[in-house]
Image: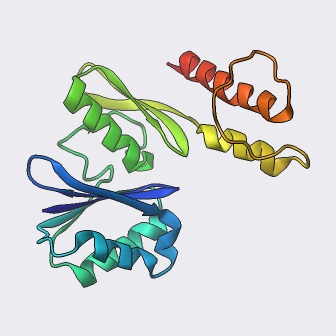
Amino acid sequence: MILLLDIGNTHTHLGLASPRRVVKRAEFPTADWRSHRAAGRLAGFVGRACLEGVSACSVVPAATVRARRWAARSVAAPWFELTAGSASPAIALHYPRPETVGPDRLSNAIAARHLHGSPCVAIDFGTAVTFDAVDARGAFIGGIIAPGISLLTDYLHERTALLPRIRLGPAPRAIGRSTEEAMRIAAVHGFAGMMRELI
């Protein structure tokens, strides 16, 4: 089995993979890497599985260091980390400063090309929304980074005195009849419009 670690800004996603498929999945808050909770969660997730390797993709450098230390202490298996340097030969990088491309973006571009061929665009809706373009030759050529929908709604709450934190949901009207509804309309329809325009 291979332990898969996808360390994002908000969540860390875990997978146990056989050569053909992912057989087990879980997640925990990435903030848990700052405590001993992450090690306990990983140990519980792996259980008695015999690991042949650990494959990591991380956009949180401090968590990456802790994950690498955990793997070195806890499992006798090779460590692979997706970076601009390790992405070849899976994908060529036609980008001015390849070392600045996030490994999450590389992973998305590699997967999109593998699943759909090229040219293609991979779109990832996370804390940020990333659009990553692969040209007809199969090379990563760049993309777009936009705020995720939760960043848009949380920012309004955090930066104003009276606007509440809202839950996303349907926005059936064009004009809001409450503060929450007005914010929801902007979030849902405005975000959808931004996505259409960027695509």
Horizontally, residue 157 falls left or right of residue 195, namely: right
Q: How many labels does the image show?
A: 0
Q: Is 23 left or right of 98, judged from the image as shown?
A: left
Q: Where is residue 22 in the image (x, y as percent from the top left)?
A: 19, 50
Specify whether 44 is left or right of 124.
Answer: left
- Residue 38 image point, x, y percent: 41, 74
In the image, residue 171 sits, relative to residue 22, either above or below, namely: above
Residue at image coords 29%, 55%: 25
49 versus 19 height, above or below = below
Against 144, is 75 above or below? below
Residue 183 horizontal side relative to residue 119, left or right: right
Q: Where is residue 10 in the image (x, y as percent from the top left)?
A: 52, 56
The structure's colour scheme is rainbow
Determine which quarter of the picture holds residue 155. top right
Tell me where residue 130 appears, x and y as whole percent: 48, 36
- Residue at 74%, 17% (x, y): give it: 173
Residue at horizontal 83%, vertical 48%?
159
Determine the residue positioned at 39% across, 47% down: 104
Q: Residue furthest right?
A: 161
The quarter in which the N terminus is drawn is bottom left
Observer-nearest of 80 and 116:
116
Above/below status of 20 relative to 5:
above
Nearest the eye: 15 or 195: 15
